[in-house]
Image (cartoon, coloured by chain):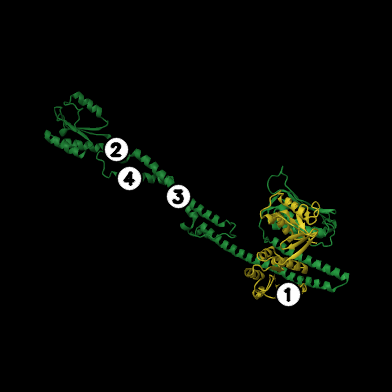
Amino acid sequence: MKWLRPLRLKHSLSSQYLLLIIAAVLFLPIALPVVSVLLFNIGNAGQAAPNPYQSGAALESMWHKEARGLAGAGAVDIDAKLRELKGAYPEADMFWVDDLGQTMLALPEQPELPDRWTPSYTVSFMKQHYNADPFTIVAFLGEHDGAGFMVMQVPREHMEPPYQRLWIHETTFIFVTMFIILVLFLLLSWLFFYRIRTRLLGLQRAMAIDDERTTPEPVTVLNLDEIGRLESSFNTMVEQLRQSRQREEEEEQLRRQLIANLSHDLRTPLTAIRGHIYSLREEVSSPEGQSSLELVDSKIGYLSELIDNLLSYSLLYAGKYPRHPERTDIVRLVRAQAAHWYPAFEEASFVIELDLPESGMYWELDPRWLERVLDNLFQNVLRHARSGRYIEIRVELPDQATDTREGGGAILIRDRGPGMQGDSPDKGTGLGLSIVSLMLQEMQLRWQIDSTEDGTTIRIQPD
Amino acid sequence: MTRILYIEDDHDIGSWTVTDLQKRGYQVTWLKTGEEADTHAGDADLVILDIMLPGLDGFTIGQRLKKQWPDLPILMLSARTAVDDKLLGLQFADDYLTKPFHPDELAARIQVLLRRGTPAETRQLALEHLSIKLPGCQIIDTRTNEEVLLTGKQFHIFMYLLKHPGQVLTKEQIYESVWGEPYLDGDKTLNVHIRYLREKIEADPSQPTIIQTVRGIGFRVRLS
């Protein structure tokens, strides 16, 4: 069972994709706590020493303990003690008042303090600082009344825990971190998709076949994942295609060669026959003999034409008849072709009516193909419509009013023979007309045959 | 005597063609392969060449001969009728005739090629009341025994028509051959020149008999 095979990440796009999806789903529930924990640790790490101001109770007991220790101490001792404490708690303000209510040492100087503490000022000081900022501790020296007191004031901002102090920065930090993670995630998934896309496009480019190549180029397989497997299957296919193309070409070559050889081999004896008939003419004296020799000679001509048609038809049918379309002046081509056939029609005492415009008319086609078509059609008229002794060749220009684009107009060939249904002494297989039909179709021309017993009109025009 | 080098591998066709050509007064050397073509071609006035030969094929032999003797006329005589073959052949050969050919046609084409190949040969052409000396195309009016003088273009037009006797030539063909530039629709230059030409050579220019107009197509000179 294939799906049970362990998924190797590198070789499976689906597991890579699954990983991405899992990352997306778990993004919020995992990222948020992780970020918070991280932040807390960073906050604590930033201030490794514990905050000495953090606990009010600790400060209070310390302050009272120190005050108790100063029972009966002289002013100099108290000053020294206060300075020492100030050294330990630099953020705190300290001062002391003696038993007479006189403000003694204040660290730092506090000008708003009175020199002498009246009972009313003392009360209002106490009231004012109770539960207020700064946090104020008052302790009697020696722990009994009337011996003076010392005061410590700590601004409350110093008493908050460090991470709390960072609270505002912290929310920004969380958002920024989340944003970065989000961007990273988007980048990752985009990269994932982009890589797939690049490889698919590369494959598409390799599959495209232009004019110069008949088979696609194989691609280089770098990875063994799903696309990599697709690429290697593609390469196998390309190889098979190439081989079959080559076989096909060889077969086609063989076939062409065969037909050409066949045509050659058929013509060679015909040539000899014709030659000997020619020699016989001088030997045979009776008119019957002469006329049968003439018949044989004309049949040889017909047979040779048939061979030629067979060759052309087989090449045409296989799509191997050489074709080089170009912008061709139809009037000029029809005129040249009519000129070529003129003596033959004249000899058969045809009335030849030509109606060719003065200006050119352009169609996009291989001129040799159209020449071949006209040859076949004229040959047909000469052979099958001889009794009518009439041919009309006409080129109609496109109607300027309705059809301004290039490629309009028509070629018209009309005879007064017995029609295509009628009897002709040389009625053949119609191979000539099949060739005309195939060639016109390939040239994207339409033809229309209007044949009655009074004659045939053939009209050729672009599709 | 005109010497023809004939290369043909088929015995029946070869022996018969040789006989026919000899009857027509040609001296024929017949080779069955092209191997020794080079040694005989130097003496020949014309080469008739088949394409399908054992060993070297006709295309190769023809190209070789043409390279060595560019003025030697070569007539391809082949049973290969594909358009490609004809085009390939006519790249170097002067004419291409397909089998089964008619002996008269072969003889006619040989004559055309020889005429083209030997400009020194003088011929006298009689056309109605005109006597034309080729290749200079000196035209004598036999009624007065005076020479008819043509302008350059008239001369070229007449020569071109004479070179293709019996053929109907379109005005595009004549114009492009004489002027050497593409014919433009509706150009009357050629008609004007033909009119002047007729005034000089025709007995009755309004009823031309030498240069015939083939309505809708072009012109023709028919030799009687």
Q: Do callouts 4 and 2 mark residues in contact (Cβ within 8 Å)?
A: no
Residue under label 1: B27
Measured as percent of width and height from the top left, residue A75 is found at 12, 33
For the residue marked with disc 3, what is the amino acid? Leu
Reading the chain from its start, which is encountered first: label 3 or label 4?
4
Q: Are marks 3 and 4 on the same chain?
A: yes
Residue under label 3: A188
Q: Which mark is residue A160?
A: 2
For the residue marked with disc 2, what is the amino acid? Glu
Q: CA distance from mark 1 to mark 2?
A: 130 Å
For the residue marked with disc 4, what is the amino acid? Ile
Q: CA distance from mark 3 to mark 1?
A: 91 Å
* Chain letter, disc 3 residue: A
Determine the residue positioned at 83% across, 59% down: A348
Circle 1: element type: strand
Q: Which chain is yellow?
A: B
Of tags 3 and 2, the one toward the viewer is: 3
